[in-house]
Amino acid sequence: MTIEFDKNGYAVSSGDVSVYNTAPDSGEFIGVSNEFIHTGQGLPARAYLDAPPKAKKGFAICRSKDELQWEYKADHRGEVRYSTITGEKITVTALGEYPPDTTDSAPPKFNQWDGVQWVPNSDLLASIARQYRDAFIIATDPMMVSDYSIDDMPLTEAQRSELTAIRAAYRAWPTVIGWPLIGLPELPQWLLIEAVNQGYQVPVWPELPDVA
């Protein structure tokens, strides 16, 4: 039995009718149901008489804002994006186009977005590199006193000379061509061990696989 409705949407007779239902927030089509409508009664909220179009890959079927017709909306839900401002990982949860200021490529470490792609953040790289340099200088400052000893053995003249040269190399490191994406000055084993004993944490630098 087909029910007729007047121009205001109220049934002119009672009976069963198939309706197409939508989600309250998104207007997305969520299924068909059979409803009994009494005379003078309208359709349930968010229910419509006209059938939605066929499913379309990559899109959701939704009711238009004016509720007069069905429309396709891009459906990227579940896809992963990355903020071009913060680099934060974002999982798309809403219908529609991708969130603004996002990209599908993950940001490499120490990179920033240049409007088209991720590129090394020179200022950040330089700042981190200087921190690594300063950490070594601070850790080896105590070793510069004249009576410094290791296991009760004073530094030899060769060790003092090597220490002075290495510290100078660290200070000059930012002036070397290619800095900061170049390796730190190499440490002799005895100095590396003693610097670590003084609290120095040996960094992995440069992290070329991430920043290249």
Image (tube, helix red, strand yellow):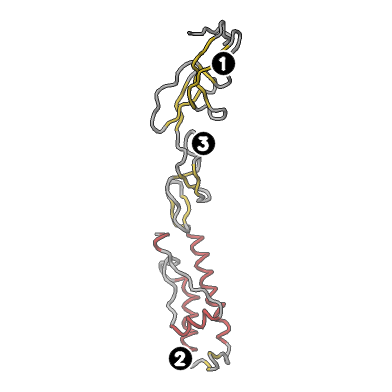
Q: Residues within 10 Å of mark 2 (few under 14, many from 20)?
A: few
Question: Residue 57's spot in the image, x, y percent?
Answer: 38, 32
SS state under label 3:
loop
- Residue type, label 1: Leu
Rendered position, 66 above or below 57? above
How many numbered marks does the figure carry? 3
Question: Residue 192's spot in the image, x, y percent?
Answer: 47, 80
Rendered position, 108 above or below 37? below
Mark 2 or mark 1: name the one nearer the start of the chain: 1
Q: CA distance from mark 3 to mark 1?
A: 27 Å
**Quarter holding the C terminus?**
bottom left
> Which residue is drawn at the image coordinates 54% and 20% (left, top)?
47
Rendered position, 48 above or below 157? above
Quadrant of the rendered image containing residue 37 = top right
SS state under label 2:
helix
Q: Residues within 10 Å of mark 3 (few under 14, many from 20)?
A: some
Question: Residue 179's spot in the image, x, y percent?
Answer: 44, 67
> Which residue is drawn at the image coordinates 39% and 24% (left, top)?
54
Mark 3 or mark 1: name the one nearer the start of the chain: 1
Rendered position, 197 above or below 81? below
Direction right: furthest residue: 40
Q: CA distance from mark 2 to mark 1?
A: 94 Å
Quickly name the residue at label 3.
Answer: 94
Quickly name the residue at label 2.
Answer: 158
Q: Which mark is residue 56?
A: none
Q: Residues within 10 Å of mark 1 (few under 14, many from 20)?
A: some
- Residue type, label 3: Ala
Q: CA distance from mark 3 to mark 2?
A: 67 Å
Quadrant of the rendered image containing residue 38 = top right
Quickly name the residue at label 1.
Answer: 43
